[in-house]
Amino acid sequence: MNNAIRLSSLLAGFLLSGTLLAQDCELTIDSNDQMRFDKDSLTVSSECSEVTLTLTHSGKMAVEQMGHNWVLSKSEDVQGIAQDGVSAGLDNDYVKPDDERVIAATEQIGGGESTSITFSLDGLEAGSDYEFFCSFPGHVAMMRGEFIIE
Ligand code: ZN
């Protein structure tokens, strides 16, 4: 009996996995007062028409002191975007307005807050070098990881 129940819940799970693609297209990442993301890489399927990234900040510090965002770009553009972001200031979430090198970027958040962004993978290539990072001044050195499309 138990086995039958287990099997049917397995089957139900299998059927539900029709939503697997959708789940794979949703990413979460946490940030904290130690100036860290909790992941150093994120992977999505190239089959995703859209990706939704949710950024949380589990720390307590205010956005002015320990703000975090999540910015996606080609690896080669990370430093340039971060540098221009410093001049753009917190009013612009430390991202230069209309920066064409930015593929996706969330707002800056402080401790206890969360934010999310949905973006398309159109024009991005599996196997290319993409990275995510936080553009708060000085954070890119510690808060940076690989974004893998496979
Ligand atoms: Zn940060």
Image (cartoon, rainbow, N blue to C red):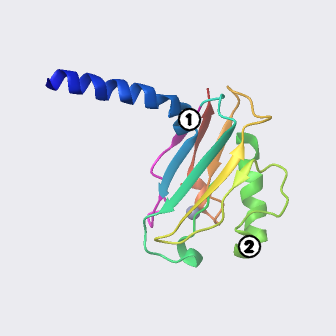
Q: Quadrant of the N terminus?
A: top left
Secondary structure category for the residue under label 1? strand
Tag shown at residue 21: none
Residue type highlighted by circle 1: Thr
Queried on whether the Cβ of the residue with tag 2 lies below 8 angstroms from ligand 1, the answer reads no
Q: Is residue 38 magenta?
A: yes
Task: Give above or below for 118 relative to 21.
Answer: below
Q: Where is residue 134 in the image (x, y as percent from the top left)?
A: 61, 58
Most frequent secondary structure within the magenta stretch = loop
Queried on whether the Cβ of the residue with tag 1 lies below 8 angstroms from ligand 1, the answer reads no
Dot in front, 2 or 1: 1
Instruction: Find the magenta span and give its range.
Output: 31-44
Q: In which quarter of the image is residue 120?
A: top right
Residue type highlighted by circle 2: Gly
- Which of the two labelled residues, at mark 2 and mark 1, occupies the earlier sequence position? 1
Q: Where is residue 100 in the image (x, y as percent from the top left)?
A: 85, 51
Residue 72 seen in this snapshot = no
Residue 47 vs residue 11: left or right? right
**Mark 2 vs mark 1, CA separation in Å:** 30 Å
Residue 46 vs residue 18: left or right? right
Residue shown at the point (55%, 43%) measured from the top left: 26
Q: Does the magenta stretch include residue 59?
A: no
Tag shown at residue 43: 1
User: Which residue is tagged 2?
Assistant: 89
Q: Quadrant of the C terminus?
A: top right
Classify 10 Å Cα crowding around label 2: few (below 14), some (14-19), many (20 and above): some
Residue shown at the point (71%, 49%) measured from the top left: 78
Q: Quadrant of ligand 1?
A: bottom right
Residue shown at the point (58%, 54%) measured from the top left: 141
Residue 101 vs residue 15: left or right? right
Q: Quadrant of residue 131?
A: top right
Residue shown at the point (79%, 62%) measured from the top left: 84
